[in-house]
Amino acid sequence: MRYIGNKTKLLPFLGDVLLQLGVTPGRAHDAFAGTASVARSLKAAGWRVESSDVMTYSYVFQRAYVVARHGPDARRAAAGDADLRRAIAHMPVLRDGLSVLAEYLSAWVEPEHGFISQHFSATGGRMYFTDENARRIDAARHALHRWREAELVSEDAYYLLLASIIEAADRVANTAGIYAAYIKKWQPNATKTFRMQPARPVSRAPGSRAHRDDATTVARKVGPVDLLYVDPPYNARQYSGYYHIPEIIAKGWFEALPVLKGKTGLPVDRPPSSLWCNKAGAARALAELLGATGARHVLVSYNTEGILSDDEFLDILGQRAVEPVRQFKQLYKRYRADQDGANRRYRASGVTELVYYIRIRK
């Protein structure tokens, strides 16, 4: 999924940092999981991961990529769904149950005019998705909900498939990568067909857990860990407004319909603004998190566009460290949700990713 702050391209860098520090796999807390790319990488490397984030779509990714260890059994779903059974009889041979169910949700279930079609398609007045793709998203999300309600899929299977629906929707979203606005002309990606490409679960490190809660609250709850990884926003972007459609897809609309407002269809009921998105709040929140964690080793990602000055940042880290703070750097191409123009000028095409290491317990 296109995501501000996504660390997928920086995973080798983070792995090298841990190697240089001699920090070996144990128990880790990824405090701001986002798309769960770092938590998933840690799990694949043998870490038992506690991941957390306040957003529901992040919880879906955590359950799919950090917690889940087994894919679905298509026979279990087919036993209770006659339409799925008929579709399987005509499908090409696929490698496993996850592929079968994703194929059905992508291309075989009958498209339907549901919540996404009504509010986030051209017909609905907001050009986030073509009418066809919106109906396919509605149908896939509704079918998955029915399967879960009827206990035709396991919880692992549910989250693996839901994560794939969110990611497939993002690939055909008519945006520049965030949902704060849609583009008024159809972009090439938006005219492609909605198609799920589910990722296989990571079977290593049993016992990993996902949390939909504040990072500091979770740090207190999970207790002693070997590693805390911190990668909060450090900027003014409120993710609840930038990714409201993935959040709606993650939550669903089957128990209660979300009430929307404005040109982009923001839910009226949204999380409060994050402390991490203003200078004073970020400084206080970082200090509180470092005081709450039971970690021995702490890695904190930061970059040259953060709202805290380098001196402020180092002062907060230094107050908790029992050894000198160490810094690691890597230049990477910055995320751009749009292009330079009359009203927007990026400071640079690259951003220096900074990773600080502190040891807070001997």
Image (spheres, rainbow, N blue to C red):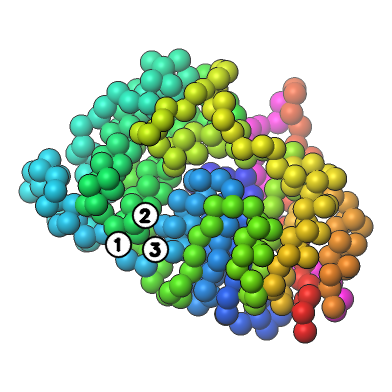
Mark closer to the chain start, 3 or 2: 3
Q: Callout 1 environment at 10 Å: few (<14), some (14 to 19), or many (20+)?
A: many
Badge 3 vs badge 2, beta-carbon distance below 8 Å: yes
Tell me the residue at 67%/68% (across/down): 228
Please tell me how crowded label 3 is: few (under 14), some (14-19), or many (20+) other residues with Cα within 10 Å. Answer: many
Which secondary structure lies at badge 1? loop
- Callout 3: SS: loop
Q: CA distance from mark 3 to mark 2?
A: 8 Å
Whether the residues at callouts 3 and 1 have beta carbons within 8 Å, the answer is: yes
**Marking on residue 160:** 2
Give how far across and how far down residue 318 sits, in percent. 88, 68
The quarter holding residue 76 reads bottom left
Residue 337 located within the stretch drawn in magenta: yes
Indicate the amino acid at tag 3.
Answer: Ala
Q: Amino acid at mark 2?
A: Leu
Tell me the magenta residue range.
323-341
Q: Is residue 285 visible?
A: yes
Q: Earlier in the sequence, mark 2 or mark 1?
A: 1
Looking at the picture, does residue 293 appear above or below residue 22?
above
Q: Which residue is mark 1?
A: 71
Q: Which mark is residue 306?
A: none
- Residue at the location (62% across, 45% down)? 4
Q: Is residue 285 magenta?
A: no
Q: Image point 35% across, 33% down: which residue?
A: 254
Q: Which amino acid does the dot numbered 1 rest on?
A: Gly
Which label belongs to residue 68? 3
Question: Which image quadrant: the C terminus?
Answer: bottom right
